[in-house]
Image (cartoon, grey):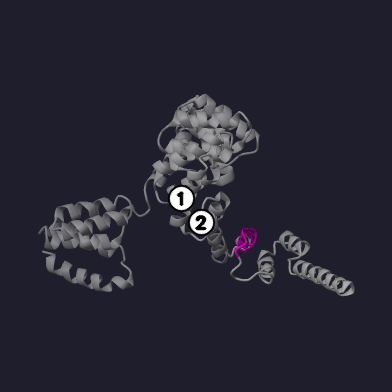
Amino acid sequence: MKRTAYIISILCLCFNCFTVYAQQSQQPDNDKLLKLYQTQQYLEAAEYLKTFYSDTVADPAVLDRLGYCYRMAGAYAQAEPYYLRLYTLDSLQVSTLLNLATIYVQRGLYAPATTYYQRIIALDTAHVTAYTALSAMMRRKGDLPSAYAYLEQANHHQSSNSDIAYDFAQLCITFEQYAKADSVLELALTTDPGHGLLLLGKLQVAEKLENYSDMVTIGEQLVTQGDESQQVMSLLSRGYFHTNDFASCQATYERLLAIYEQMGEIDYYYLAMAYKATKQYKEGLACMDKVLELAISPNTAFYYGRIADLHDLANQPSAAASSYLRSFQFETIPLHYYSLAVIYDHKLNNRHNALRYYRLYLKQNPPIEENQYRQYVQQRIKELEP
């Protein structure tokens, strides 16, 4: 009897050992997973994990692991169901909410992403990532007041974060809150006085506040640090101009043109005025020609022609004629001469002007595709000539 009991106990022990071994052998190899993670083979890691677990697995750790692998692989649609199941198990888990929001943003599904980010800040009022993400999505939909409010909260919790400070300052500039933008940037600069992005923001704000000496100081610091971007050199040049350092203004603009070959309308104007101040009038005139060239759209003549068309259709022939005439101040479009002649001929009953513009149309040597107009004009001139 004792021998039988002993044998049974040995069998039970062996069975238990076998069960433990079997369970252990059915677990993923963590070393293998680590290697897959290190080589960024996340999709392979997910497929490897799925060989150990059924589709109905409810273990939060396993769901999180699978969701993570698919998310890191960029397979966001495949990651979503795992995070949704985690959300069903615990709707107050911030990490789950954050992962859901992130994958919805990556898929361009901004409405559900907004909902999950808002749930995050309801649970954690200091969650900076959620505030910045919400601000970005509000800007995307054109809701700048909400974008401002969310980013203000993010900046409140992390005032030294340079990216947040710069973005918030830009929104302050949009709302013409220049002093606030300046204080936000100044506070962030206390922890990193040489931060180029923050200094650029300070330079932009200094122009708005008309702190021209600050523009020179900050602009020179940025150039010394190696930032010779077009924006920095343009703002530095304006700072020199407003502090009456016309020689430095010219030199910086000329350096800008040497690097970038072109600049904006307002910068050519400042350079022209700097040349004027130093009595370099020919150079100033050349710059003013560039100002006018940039100020006038190359499509202006065409636009006046379309305005004339609308006046004509609205039975306003005098206004139509006036618009066609204005178009010639910018560019000669042969068909505008034809249209103008027709208005004078048939709507304003002005034979003299009709003849004049019919003839001018022919002098432009209209393209072959306008042959029907050419033939009509030639015939009409014969009919109108005395």
- The quarter in which the N terminus is drawn is bottom right
Q: Let me know if residue 253 appears in the view.
A: no
Q: Is mark 1 on a helix, strand or loop?
A: helix
**Viewer-proximal residue among 129 and 208:** 129
Percent x, y of residue 30? 76, 62
Magenta stretch holds residue 63: yes
Residue 244 lies, with reference to residue 76, above or below; the image says above
Q: In which quarter of the image is residue 158?
A: top right
Magenta stretch holds residue 353: no
Q: Tags 1 and 2 in contact by the CB under 8 Å rule? A: yes
Which residue is rendered at x = 12% and y = 69% of the image?
383
- Label 1: few (<14), some or many (≥20) within 10 Å? many
Magenta part of the chain: 58-70
The reply, left or right, for residue 308 in relation to residue 346 is right
Residue 3 lies, with reference to residue 36, above or below; the image says below
Percent x, y of residue 173? 44, 36
- Disc number at residue 84? none
Which residue is rendered at x = 48% and y = 54% of the image?
113
Residue, disc 1 = 137
